[in-house]
Image (cartoon, rainbow, N blue to C red):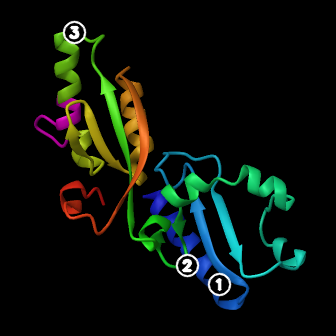
């Protein structure tokens, strides 16, 4: 709930800045806040301008100034395209390019006994209440693989951590126009 209130404040501030400053092309948030981390320490913001800007504009923001070469070398391209969210257009960057972003999680239960596996599956699928799959809008992709929306990735990671489950995650994007995209829809 607190996250939604903060997101709405960010959208309003971004739209105000966009409306009064014609040099701003877009304002994008990315990182742990977008991935649904419960208590992110910061919010990563990328402001895109249509030309080189006057440094006085940056005083509005807690900006990290970088040279062009260090900016390009350290630019979080994958994060921006995969999890970035445009505060101006109110869409994920991937959606603006007609892609859907998600995380594919592969987990292993090889070190778990039968009781532990059953408890894990009850928590994952639910028993007398909603399971983690439903609350995170995730879907079973295949045996021991789930597809999760970007906004719930950190929640799934936390779930696996709390259950002491070995896993790895892979950020993926697939075209919205994909014929069977409805079957994969996680948003």
The residue beneath circle 3 is 113
- Given residues 121 and 3, the one toward you in this image is 121
For residue 142, above or below residue 166: below
Residue drawn at x 23%, y 25% as measured from the top left: 120
The secondary element bearing badge 1 is classed as helix
Magenta-highlighted residues: 122-130
In the image, taking residue 105 as reference, residue 49 lies left or right, namely right
In space, the residues marked 1 and 3 are separated at their CA atoms by: 55 Å
> Toward which corner of the image does residue 119 lie, by quadrant?
top left
Q: Are marks 1 and 2 in contact (CB under 8 Å)?
A: yes
The residue beneath circle 1 is 18
- Few, some or many C-alpha atoms within 10 Å of disc 2 (few <14, some 14-19, many ≥20)? many
Residue 9 locus on image (x, y percent): 56, 71
The secondary element bearing badge 2 is classed as loop
Q: Are marks 1 and 3 in contact (CB under 8 Å)?
A: no
Instruction: State which tag comes first along the sequence, 1 or 3.
Output: 1
For residue 102, above or below residue 115: below
- Given residues 66 and 58, the one toward you in this image is 66
């Amino acid at each position: 709930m607190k996250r939604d209130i903060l997101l709405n404040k960010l959208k309003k501030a971004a739209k105000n800045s966009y409306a009064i400053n014609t040099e701003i092309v877009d304002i994008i948030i990315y990182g742990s806040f977008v991935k649904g981390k419960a208590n992110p320490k910061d919010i990563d913001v990328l402001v895109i301008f249509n030309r080189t800007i006057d440094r006085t504009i940056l005083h509005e923001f807690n900006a990290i100034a970088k040279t062009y070469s260090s900016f390009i070398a350290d630019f979080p391209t994958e994060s921006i395209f995969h999890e970035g969210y445009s505060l101006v257009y109110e869409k994920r960057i991937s959606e603006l390019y007609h892609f859907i972003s998600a995380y594919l999680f592969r987990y292993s239960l090889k070190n778990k006994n039968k009781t532990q596996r059953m408890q894990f599956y009850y928590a994952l699928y639910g028993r007398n209440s909603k399971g983690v799959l439903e609350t995170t809008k995730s879907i079973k992709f295949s045996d021991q693989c789930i597809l999760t929306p970007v906004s719930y990735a950190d929640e799934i990671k936390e779930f696996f951590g709390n259950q002491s489950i070995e896993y790895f995650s892979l950020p993926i994007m697939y075209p919205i126009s994909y014929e069977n995209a409805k079957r994969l829809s996680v948003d």
